[in-house]
Amino acid sequence: MAMIKVGIVGGTGYTGVELLRLLVNHSAVQVVVITSRSEAGRPVADLFPNLRGHLDLAFTEPDPALLASCDLVFFATPNGIAMQQVPELLEAGVRVIDLAADFRISDQALWEKWYGMQHACPERLAEAVYGLPEVNREAVKQARLVANPGCYPTAVGLGFLPLVEQGLIELDHLVADTKSGVSGAGRGASVAALMGETGESFKAYAIPGHRHQPEIRQTLMRASGGDVGLTFVPHLVPMIRGIEATLYARLKDVSVDLQALFEKRYADEPFVDVMPAGSHPETRSVRGVNHCRIAVHRPLDGDVVVISTVIDNLVKGAAGQAVQNMNLMFGLAEDAGLEQVALLP
Amino acid sequence: MAMIKVGIVGGTGYTGVELLRLLVNHSAVQVVVITSRSEAGRPVADLFPNLRGHLDLAFTEPDPALLASCDLVFFATPNGIAMQQVPELLEAGVRVIDLAADFRISDQALWEKWYGMQHACPERLAEAVYGLPEVNREAVKQARLVANPGCYPTAVGLGFLPLVEQGLIELDHLVADTKSGVSGAGRGASVAALMGETGESFKAYAIPGHRHQPEIRQTLMRASGGDVGLTFVPHLVPMIRGIEATLYARLKDVSVDLQALFEKRYADEPFVDVMPAGSHPETRSVRGVNHCRIAVHRPLDGDVVVISTVIDNLVKGAAGQAVQNMNLMFGLAEDAGLEQVALLP
Amino acid sequence: MAMIKVGIVGGTGYTGVELLRLLVNHSAVQVVVITSRSEAGRPVADLFPNLRGHLDLAFTEPDPALLASCDLVFFATPNGIAMQQVPELLEAGVRVIDLAADFRISDQALWEKWYGMQHACPERLAEAVYGLPEVNREAVKQARLVANPGCYPTAVGLGFLPLVEQGLIELDHLVADTKSGVSGAGRGASVAALMGETGESFKAYAIPGHRHQPEIRQTLMRASGGDVGLTFVPHLVPMIRGIEATLYARLKDVSVDLQALFEKRYADEPFVDVMPAGSHPETRSVRGVNHCRIAVHRPLDGDVVVISTVIDNLVKGAAGQAVQNMNLMFGLAEDAGLEQVALLP
Amino acid sequence: MAMIKVGIVGGTGYTGVELLRLLVNHSAVQVVVITSRSEAGRPVADLFPNLRGHLDLAFTEPDPALLASCDLVFFATPNGIAMQQVPELLEAGVRVIDLAADFRISDQALWEKWYGMQHACPERLAEAVYGLPEVNREAVKQARLVANPGCYPTAVGLGFLPLVEQGLIELDHLVADTKSGVSGAGRGASVAALMGETGESFKAYAIPGHRHQPEIRQTLMRASGGDVGLTFVPHLVPMIRGIEATLYARLKDVSVDLQALFEKRYADEPFVDVMPAGSHPETRSVRGVNHCRIAVHRPLDGDVVVISTVIDNLVKGAAGQAVQNMNLMFGLAEDAGLEQVALLP
């Protein structure tokens, strides 16, 4: 079978190097181009020495013709870049997975409000498939443009979905208290992300409002068919990788078998692991892998359900889910290139 | 003025060394005895080299006569020890601050259920003063026996109190999502607290139920005069010191000026710092000091109030609050020995 | 081709779970038994949740018959265990790789001095092959008993070998200043390895003498054919995985092309990466993989050569090197099961 | 007694906030001005919340007249700033402590080679006193301009001095293998110091040559009266504070009582702690304090002496030593404001 020719736009961030880590060992893929204005000409393995011996490619200036010759282009760019280049690529018959936020929210006005810019190709918003395979698998298979979900939205969405889909919880006051390692802030130079600033400390941030709130709400409203009230608070953890989401909702009926519900919902999902009753998932149990592990509890046998989910923000929360989507789009085994075991300890 | 003669029972844990760090520079205190069965005979500064040059004392076997000669005895022991020795000390006229949980919950049956043992001196429960100065200052001043609050209960209690006291929130479904550094698990040998197990990872624990839930609920019920429903979930953060608590409640009336409410409530408190509107407190801003910093938010201008509080679990959450209580009990300046600036970075 | 039937004795430590991580994705291997007295009956994936979905096996009591039915048995046990069971296994035709120290030092008296016990099968010491493929590849291929090298000895040995083999440095006063993450101390309950004790701190240990000193010296003396004086100081780094070794030696002749020497020496080695001149290898560049990366320098153009090497102590320093040795012993591709890319960040 | 009026130039870095932490509780000092071009007008406690309640001052634009009204000005600036402003301040009768490198090296040509710029006031180099009180106490007391030593030079110098002063080691091939937490890299925005880059990893840097090598060599040559050959390699540790230096030298005579030598040399030093024989100092034992702890060993009873020293790079390695120098210059108790106990754990 012919190799899938892949291009990556913006490969110098953590999402980019993670995509490369997964793709260089993917037997059906050939990475043919990685663009970076700032690092053009520099061998990729010089910037990311973990790739020494695995990838013999240098960063290049963005070259539309070269990208147009790919079967698939990943955008691992800041928000607002992909939307400018996607129309041309789609017209050239190239499929696109955007790891940024440009196509995640279907409501143009809502997107523009949260992202503070005008959308460059609103006409493609309807076509874009929200790439959460656990809800959109069939649509992803047919998609030409996939909006890869945000990291928090993946962790929160997978945790709430079984309950929301079945109408088992009050939807007006959901709480998602989420925590992320610092790699979520990216690889850009900043004071705030220095180890001297983030190490040995913990804090909430963006309590007044965070861009992932409308994205999560969109997922939950689609699943419920009605309105959803969601309080979403992210926190910064002094570690590099990992997201944990602790979710709180009021049960309509305390007699439901929560464990069975979750196990049934995700029985056929290759990357969602419902842990045994009583478990507490650790982020390290998914370090480097595409799994989401979930535990569901009812504290003190009351009427509140608490769900704890963990993902690796760079894998299931970004590059891994993008590869999963690619596999679906190209008819490959869904877990191709994603068979690794998490690095523990 | 004569120095206060202080004894410490069980000084080999993190609470013990932290008490010593604060007391050796306290100008009104003389530490005369530190007991430890396992380390008897060993110089304290041999076990804790940060005390070299500050403390010339060795651990000793528990000696009732020596303890009875103190003005004040701190118990920095596991739960269930203090309650066996307190009666004798009180009868000898020694005042006691218990940093463990033996006297924190007034309801004997409730205590016995959560702590899995029979209470050894239930007749002293009524006399014990819950040592949260921000609610019990006058009682602490008169107390002979102080139950020093738990770490999470301090962080959660201080965050909810202004709202609960004024009846501004729905009390049936409070949520406290809390996070602690690993020193909260103590200095005992264990696999679970190895750096190889807790480093670079994050998890919730004790979701089904944690001993601090009834303690927090007791504080909030006393403040509200009515019943309180509380979901409490603790998490383990890969850092050594610090607790952050993110609290969620539904407002009865969204027009209340939350910032003014909190500032007014704590205006005269030496160790509670209400940060400017829009702030996100970091645990490092209280590293090594007795302060609790608080921020209050109303996300997306909705009807949910979110409070974020931070303390150092070993200081305001344990040893520092114990020193604060000691200062009150002995008529000293409330911040004597507690004037340090947090270590940042 | 028939799968290699593998047994693991002592699978509850960090070396054990790392072996499993590598072996469950090794296409030529079937793990048939993992023994543990303390965890017998417990599913392995219950203790190590990263293995959920990858390994459907429970720990068992040691069963000599079952082990004797394996093609290969790995010992991931404390020192002193393998030497008691190896004779019986070898007689049964089972090949053995010992990840502990029992067969690393050929000189029985020297071994007994450093390890503080009598050797249980000194008659096998001569037969054991020291499993550093970069010096003993052919012997490993024929070996029935492989002594897998220590972590520090691997990092130090690979760094000094090119110079020692060619007689280019003064051998009387070598210095190896080495640093290891905490997983090197194992997964046993202890106070010293608590995150509260090792986090945010750095220290040297075992300066008076460490067991890896004679092992390294043996490697260097074999390579040089003469005596070697070595000062070896290990340090503990507040991270989980990784070893860095900084090596110092006096050059006999400053005109030698050090970069070319190292590149030539390791040109055909699949797991030794000589980095470009001027590089400083980071431990994260080998996190989870079997590579040793090396840089060689001559500071201020003087007569001292400084070599910096990095490995993952659990992979090239333990389980990965064991798999590499297994591959050699069974005629597989040397990098089978070891093709992963390091997890960075 | 009148308070010493202190100004700080460049107070937004880690050295600046650390100076403030120490000075706000110093009973003889009043901080009257803190300059910062980038943060002018912003309250200091807004940038550094640990100072809330301790310091009611805002950053200001540099104001020569205001600085000239101080008794003492600290420069906590990048290299090359102090040398431009010092002459004017000295002429105005203001004393100066420069925490940067401008006046550390007396040899102008050597300084210019390593720092890559022309010195702006070479005529003051001879007057500047190198502020290592353990060698220059009397000169510091009389100094008008103190060059505060570098962090590594303090840790390495104090470790080698007893041996070098007494001529007990071969001076041609000293080795200093040093390790620092990331706060040593400062608080400027950078990719290299992100937690995503430095967390959970360890590496050597600047092996070809580092600016602290000539500074250390100057100290050792002054102490020995002869030439010194020094190989100096720094490393980056994934922690925030702390330096450990492991020093290697060949003894001329192995019969010297090393422990007694070190204890005698530092018997009267308030901030140098020679630990008991057999010790291994931890950086956490000096976290936040001005002490240097030292252990001296002779591994395997050979002819190599190994010294391990630890300091807090921001305290004894910067701000604390600056305060110690200030105390000496103004006739205060040498440990005024420096009496704290290290934060452990």
Image (tube, coloured by chain):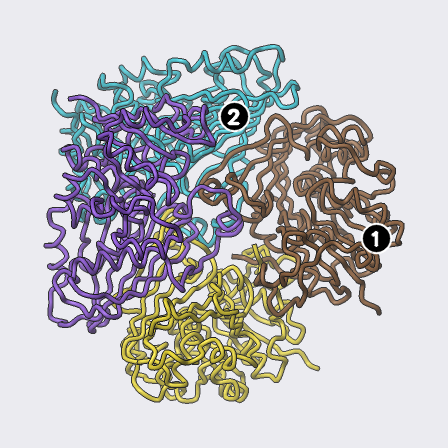
Chain colours: A yellow, B purple, C brown, D cyan
Q: Do we see residue D11 in this rendering?
A: no
Q: Is residue C323 in view from this perspective? A: yes
User: Residue C259, position in %: x, y?
Assistant: 68, 42
Q: Nearer the viewer, residue B336 or D114?
A: B336
Q: Quadrant of the N terminus of chain B?
A: top left
Chain label for disc 2: D
- From the viewer's side, name the closer residue of A228 and B344: A228
Query: According to the image, label 1 marks what residue?
Result: C95
Above or below: residue D102 compared with residue A16: above
Instruction: Place residue D119 in its image quadrant.
Output: top left
- List x then y, in percent, for residue D163: 52, 15
Q: Which residue is mark 2?
A: D279
- Crowd class of label 2 (few under 14; some 14 to 19; many from 20; radius 10 Å): some
Q: Is residue D209 above or below residue A188?
A: above
Q: Residue at x 11, y 46 (%)?
A: B268
Q: Chain of mark 1?
A: C
In this rendering, the answer to whether A234 lies above or below A127 is above
Name the amino acid type tagged 2. Ser
The image shows residue A59 at horizontal and vertical percentages of: 54, 64
Q: Residues within 10 Å of mark 1 (few under 14, many from 20)?
A: many
Q: Is residue B328 left or right of residue A16?
A: left
Q: Which mark is residue B124?
A: none
Q: Secondary structure at mark 2?
A: loop
- Residue at the (38%, 54%) spot, across then down: A193
The C terminus of chain B appears in which quarter of the rendering?
Answer: top left
- Name the amino acid, label 1: Arg
Q: Secondary structure at mark 1?
A: strand
User: In the image, is B212 to the left or to the right of B189?
Assistant: left
